[in-house]
Image: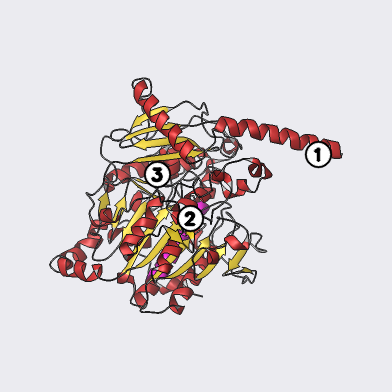
Amino acid sequence: MIQASQFKRMPHRFSLKAISLASVALCMAAWPVQAAETASKRPNIVLILVDDMGFSDISCFGGSIPTPNIDAIAAEGMRFTNFYAQPVCAPTRAALISGLYPQKAGVGVNIAKLDDPFWTKIPSPAYQSFRSQDTVTIAEVLRAGGYRTYMTGKWHLGDEPERWPVHRGFDRSFALVWGATDSNEKPVWAPYCLDDKRFTDFPDDFYVTDAFTERAIEFIREGEPDKPFFLFLSYNAPHLPHGAPTSSVQRVKGHLELDPVKERQRRFARQKELGLFGPDVELGRPLEVSGSWEKESPETLRERFETYAAMIDRVDEQVGNLVAELKRLGRYDDTLLVFLSDNGCVYPGFGVPWAEASNTPFRLMKGSSHEGGIRVPFIVRWPGQTPADTINHKQVGHVMDLLPTFAEAAGIEIPATYEGRTLQPIDGVSILNSFRNPDHGGSRTLFWEMACAGAAVRDGNWKLVRVQPDVYGEFPVGPQSGDWELYDLSVDPTENHDLAAKYPERVKEMAERHAAWEKQCNVLPWQTISSELAKFRAEEKAKESSRN
């Protein structure tokens, strides 16, 4: 087992510019030569995804918790402030791995919900679990182009063995099949797989974040040193249930305010200092809601959030271990590395105010199509290609862009057919040029919809968004009127000032475009799903009564 002591943790409060200025000065003269040499090589690609982590939880995005290893990646690379995921876990993974809107990949709601017999009665391919007949994955594209492909971590794209990573393009995999697990408690109740077999041989000192990293390193060591590899390292941290090693909990002690409102304000000030947001941006207004967390003491709630933060600390430690091994193998500077979260933080465990602190500066959280649910931290490091310590504010990116971006970086054409199957044209676009230039970016239109998470459309800087009644009762936070709200994100990225009443024609036009997109993706209106679900539940209850 690789020990945390094998790499040195850096001090927390530092300037990203201070770290990178020396290296930038040394390499400026050689930049054209290095860029030409690197461009002729096919990079290794490492994609690190974390689970339910808020926008401000790592210190290079304004957080109070030390994340020195992730910060070092940012110091040598580029941060993006306009990058998007889906509102919840499985749809983000479906979009990321397929390059499609998740509804087109069959994951219109979370995979756990698709296990409900109700969805088998819904005549729409948008809700039939991750599709294989007309989709291709990042791993399948890269493997066909000569890459070794590895996956460790949370899969959450199908429980059946035929849907496991090894059957979707990964040469080696060690995966948490479900969407959640206890991080360090035994017996381990969630299913894991090692390649094509169930895995049950858990050591006494098992901690899931460590195990995912150790397997990733093992796979890379086993690979051919002259062949590029793709690693999808999909941590389940800091997803519920929260649990962390004592050493990580101790490291985060003393870094958080007792009052989450003050913590949020401190993070927001730090974000402005870092240049992530301009001086005129307002902090998103808090939700005015009550909940069971109000019965707990401030000390108890902070302690629970510290455990959540300690899970992020452990991720940072393990990212450091991975980087150290890549350096030891002489492969780090041949690697395109991306780090991001799959959606915003969610409130169970420590309450809405702490979740809002995590998602600073945005409103709402996981399960919402407002910015707090879908805008995520995104970092890329690519030596010789990505200028160090830069911030891209212009590129609007989405997780479905990663497949075409990685394919372009590898010089691989995305196929129209795969193993005799005709594929859907992907929805994502390559954003590779923005990896090279922090001023590169362009206008585009993106859509979101989920029965438990509302809907949205971003068209350029305009965003139309609604919070509709939660069909499943999974994320009952905030008003759920179903009314459209309109925001100009160029001046109001935190969605404080609803302009729907001022621009009704724009609302009408964008809502019509969203409806057309829903039809294209076989999305059913939330009212239809709600009505059909109520009928189904009543029928099931009647059957149960008749049996008794």
- Residue visible at 66% across and 60% down in the picture: 189
Q: Earlier in the sequence, mark 3 or mark 1?
A: 3
Residue extending furthest toward the left: 29
Local crowd size for mark 3, using a 10 Å CA cut-off: few (<14), some (14–19), many (≥20): many
| Residue at the image position 33 percent from the left and 53 percent from the top | 60
Alpha-carbon distance for marks 2 and 1?
39 Å
Provide the residue designation for mark 1: 544
Q: Which residue is mark 2?
A: 135
Q: Relative to residue 34, is residue 492 drawn left or right?
A: right
Depth check: give the residue in front, 49 or 230. Answer: 230
Q: Label 3, secondary structure: give it.
A: loop
Q: Give the structural element (helix, strand or loop) at label 1.
A: helix
| Label annotation for residue 375 | 3
Q: CA distance from mark 3 to mark 1?
A: 43 Å
Quadrant of the image occupied by residue 36? bottom left
The x and y percentages for residue 485 are: 41, 28
Please report the bounds of the magenta region as a residue range.
307-323
Please state if 293 lies on the left or on the right of 256 as rendered: right
Residue 290 in percent (x, y) is at 55, 31
Coloration of the structure image: secondary structure
Nearer-the-camera pick, 37 or 415: 415
312 sits to left or right of 475? left
Q: Main secondary structure of the magenta part?
A: helix
Amino acid carrying label 3: it is Arg
Given residues 67 and 11, the one toward you in this image is 67
Asked if residue 223 shows in the view, the reply is yes
Report x, y in % for residue 243. Answer: 56, 56
What's under tag 2, amino acid-wise?
Thr
Quarter of the picture containing the C terminus is top right
3 and 1 marks in contact (CB < 8 Å)? no
Of tags 2 and 1, the one toward the viewer is: 2
Pinpoint residue 72: horizontal percent, then vertical percent. Answer: 32, 62
